[in-house]
Image (spheres, helix red, strand yellow):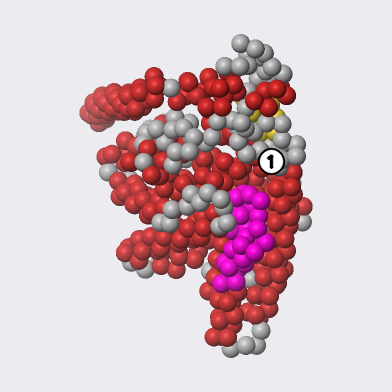
Amino acid sequence: MATASLGVLLGKVPWSHCHGPFCMAGGATDGAAAAALAEVTTEPAWTLSLGHFWSLIELAVFQVLGTLAMISIAGLSYSVKQSSLGPWARKALMLALSTVSLMAPLTVIKQVGTASGVARFQLSIFGVLAFFRLLELLFGTGPKGFDTSAKNFVIYFSSLAEVCFDDKARLLLRPAGVLRQIVSNLLRNAMLLLACLSLGRATDWMPLLGSGIDAAKLPLFGFPYSLPSSWLQAGLVYLILNMSFTSQRLLVALLGFNTAELMRNPLLCSTSIRDFWGRRWNLLIHNLMKRTFFKPLAAGSRLSRHAGALLAFVASGLFHEYMWLAVNLGSAGNSYLPGGPLLFFFAQFVLGSGEAMLAGSALGQVASDLPAPVKTIFTTLAILPCGPAFLSGLLNMFLESTAVMPTVGLAPHFRANMAILVRGQVLGTWFPQVFLLGIASVAGLLVVKKAVFAGSTRSKLHENSIAGTERLMGS
């Protein structure tokens, strides 16, 4: 075998799309890496890509223009509400603005064009947020104080962060030390995003499945082989959203106001399905759905409360259908299958309802007594099997993100070894058995622990009963 320098190596390996001016190496396919192994024995273990410069500039420009557009829509819609027009005329104008807010990102993507799916994803967020906040203004379902003044509404409406109000409907001022905390969170999120992108680049976002495989088209969504890829892809969505939210929190904090934390480590700390969706994942959308659909029906019967919850999940599915359509609009390879996000959120509603129904049962009590890490594992195993239905529409964005954003890449021989280890016949053959054995072992340990705990409780109750009888007899 011959040796080669990095320059010779890059000339021999057919790297996948990496079009940035500062890009030193893109993600190689497993076949290319294996072929390179036949000719190269020494090369750097890793390479650094700084991403695509103009795509990153495009992201920043769309962020600024999107915020300016939100400010303009907020000012215009608030003026319409405060105008002397009749109630039906005001409602008609605000509904028209809501429609324009949804159509504007699609028009920009179609007519102007964007370099990456990440930019289209960012634009679609502005469209969804403007639409639902206009509905809040129209029906008065926003948080207390959001429309008491033009200043309050413009700040509330135009920020991707959730600004906070006090009991007197005033904007809460920034607490001491929160600015440092937000900057620290932003830096930590940036490092985690780099790690996630690098891992996605090394595995083509499909560990255990292989490049180009869409788990949504496999039987049972590729379960259990698709679990690692679903978790990795969900991690990227989480980090992109959290980066955007935290950046907006920083901007609002610099203006002197306080905002709520919108992502609370859902993938590593959620202890139930309701905890995941209600207290940890994307609380910006959760609060919008809760105020717009659930609360208006929550004061009614039990059936109306369930209807409100179902309506909130259906609305979540529908606006994600819109976002996935925007992300794939004009894309060379469209991976969006209509109905996937809606199916996913309906499944989450069913799972959350089932969890609520079992909360007071013996099984629910056993689950509530589990250690937090175990509950997180079972929560993940409940949510992620349907993940491919939700994530399939973003596959092209995932692949593009490793070329658009900075990443650390492995050299071809490391990638080939990883392919042999992760996707090899041995691990591929034994993964389901190991997976099921692990679940069975955890379940067995929990049963034993529960039995021991129940036995010790009965023994303690018996001792307490005897002691109580002796005290009673002694008295």
Residue at x-position 68% and y-position 19%? 44
- Tell me if mark 1 has few (under 14), some (14-19) or many (20+) residues whose alpha carbon lies within 10 angstroms of its own: some
The answer to whether residue 285 shows anywhere in this view is: no
Figure check: 326 above or below 204: below
Asked whether 461 or 348 is in front, the reply is: 348
Q: Quadrant of the N terminus?
A: top right
Name the residue located 56 percent from the left edge and 42 percent from the top edge.
398
| Quadrant where the C terminus is found in the figure | top left
- Look at the picture and state if 2 lies above or below 22: above
Q: Is residue 184 above or below residue 34?
A: below
Does dot 1 land on a helix, a strand or a loop? Answer: loop
Magenta residues span 98-125
Residue of label 1 = 19
Residue 429 vs 124, above or below: the answer is above
**Viewer-closest of 227 and 94:** 227
User: Does the magenta segment cover residue 99?
Assistant: yes
Q: Quadrant of residue 448?
A: top left
Residue 150 located left or right of residue 212: right
Image side of residue 462 versus residue 216, left or right: left
Amino acid at dot 1:
His
Percent of width and height locating residue 229: 47, 36
Question: Can the viewer see residue 102?
Answer: yes
